[in-house]
Amino acid sequence: MRVVMVAAECAPIAKVGGLGDFIHGLSRALVAAGATVQVLLPYYRGLLSERWVSLLEPLDEGVSIPFDGGTLACACWRLRVEGLECILIDPAGDWFRRARLYGEPDDGLRFALFARAADALLRRPGWRPDIIHCHDWQSALLPVLRSAPGADIDAPARVCITLHNLAHQGVIEPALLTRLGVDVEALLAPGPFDDPGAPGRANLLRGAIDRADFVNTVSPRYAWEVLHTEQGMGLQGLLQAHADKFGGILNGIDDAVWDPAQDPLIPTHYGTDTLALKAHDRLALRRRLGLCARTAPILALIGRLDAQKGVELILSGIDSALALGYQVVLLGSAPDPVVATRFAAKRAALADCPDAHLELGFDEGLAHLIYAGADMILVPSRYEPCGLTQLIAMRYGTVPLVRRVGGLADTVIDANHSDHPVAERNGYLFEAPTCTAVHAVLARAAWLWHHHPHHFHRLRVNGMSADHSWRRPAARYLALYRGLLGG
């Protein structure tokens, strides 16, 4: 089976967040299971490290796509990365020669152009796959192009799209699609792009949901939430109309990268049978970040600092944790300048606190050390399609404290309030997105850590023992692909 992933990110060459890890992890797991996989990405010139640029191989054939009444040439490059074959699409001009992957004023046109070029490449002889797997709005034009009237009937690939975050839907001016030779009149009012929430504009994600052969999210709980709650972000009705081709498949993590038994980025390796050695990484973390040496649980907060992740709950959680006797370590960056200012102020206020360290930015090595050295991790997300933080934390014996939403609810089993056997319980959950609820869950976890360390140890072991690798998700995706192909 030949599968082509079409996405804006793939770790380690182009990564902003979890999407890059998803494409890398799932693709590698599919290859291990016997599939042939290619990943189509934009060529982010200027952002690709010299290490990868030196390995680029130009393809003999590029593609040309309609643009502004003429054509636009797009070169293509092959790059082999950690067992994956990536094809980088390089449109003439400065479309992807920017200082960042996203956040440009013309993102809508840039990624529509990328999807148009990807579609053109996948129609060339010798390039036609069995499955085209698109991801989020950046590649969402492609399923519509594949199903447009007059589309190439000799391109039998089945097309699916994974919704990683419905907060971003690719709402653009229809005139941008006209520039790419797309017959907008045939697609709007009524049509797959027509968005009741944005009259007269084209919603790329709506188009993909309407025209794809299958649509999925990255956890079963999030799939239910986007169907039945405001987390559908205006797409509830459309998703309900296509419920027969919609579902949720839980993400995994790359357990070769995230493995405390052999992680090269932590000083001391350990496993479930040698969990006591985690204390050495805890000591190393305290020394690196200047925390005082005392008997106290270390609470970690790792990730993007934005509204989705619960800015107010994170800031309040830091104060609550310190009041309850925790030591606190935060590693994260805030894309919003207002949010960044708030966390900078919190860091300044705690500059002389021997029990807190806030690192505003991202450091891969420090992230690994925090996972290895912390006792607990707080994930108070307002919504969370899947979440990788809690999965990685459990792999390192760091107990997750999370809101009962999305993939967090699918992967964390409460220590006290659960129908699951004690041998499966691995953390703590709370319901309300309030500072009071965060304080309460921190108090529950601290009480167990202080008064029943053997029970807390069991939570660590349970989390480390669970299989959160990509093997089972990859098997589910392969089953999905075979079903789409009639196999």
Image (tube, grey):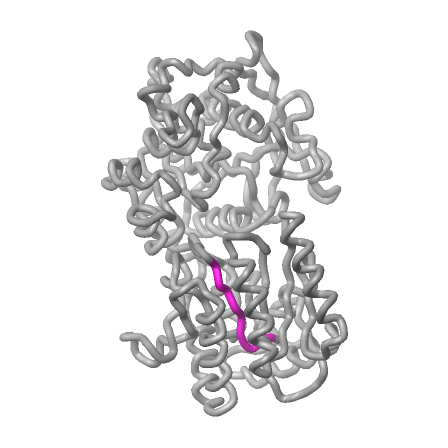
Q: Nearer the viewer, residue 255 or 245?
A: 245
Q: Which residue is located at x 59 percent, y 80 percent?
A: 323
**Magenta extent:** 374-381
Q: In this rendering, would 418 be left or right of 99? A: left
Q: Which image quarter: residue 250?
A: bottom left
Image-based side of 171 in relation to 285, left or right: left
| Of residues 141 and 199, the one drawn nearer to the viewer in this rendering | 199
Q: Relative to residue 332, is residue 429 depicted above or below?
A: below
Tell whether position 44 is magenta: no
Residue 206 pos. (x, y %): 38, 32
Q: Quadrant of the C terminus?
A: top left
Q: Is residue 264 above or below residue 107?
A: below
Q: Position of residue 64 (x, y in %)?
A: 56, 16
Which sits in the foreground, 342 or 101? Answer: 342
Quadrant in the rendering for residue 246 = top left
Q: Position of residue 220 (x, y in %)?
A: 33, 54
Whether residue 487 is visible here, answered yes or no, is no
Above or below, comparing residue 120 to residue 322 in the picture:
above
Residue shown at 48%/86% (left/top)?
447
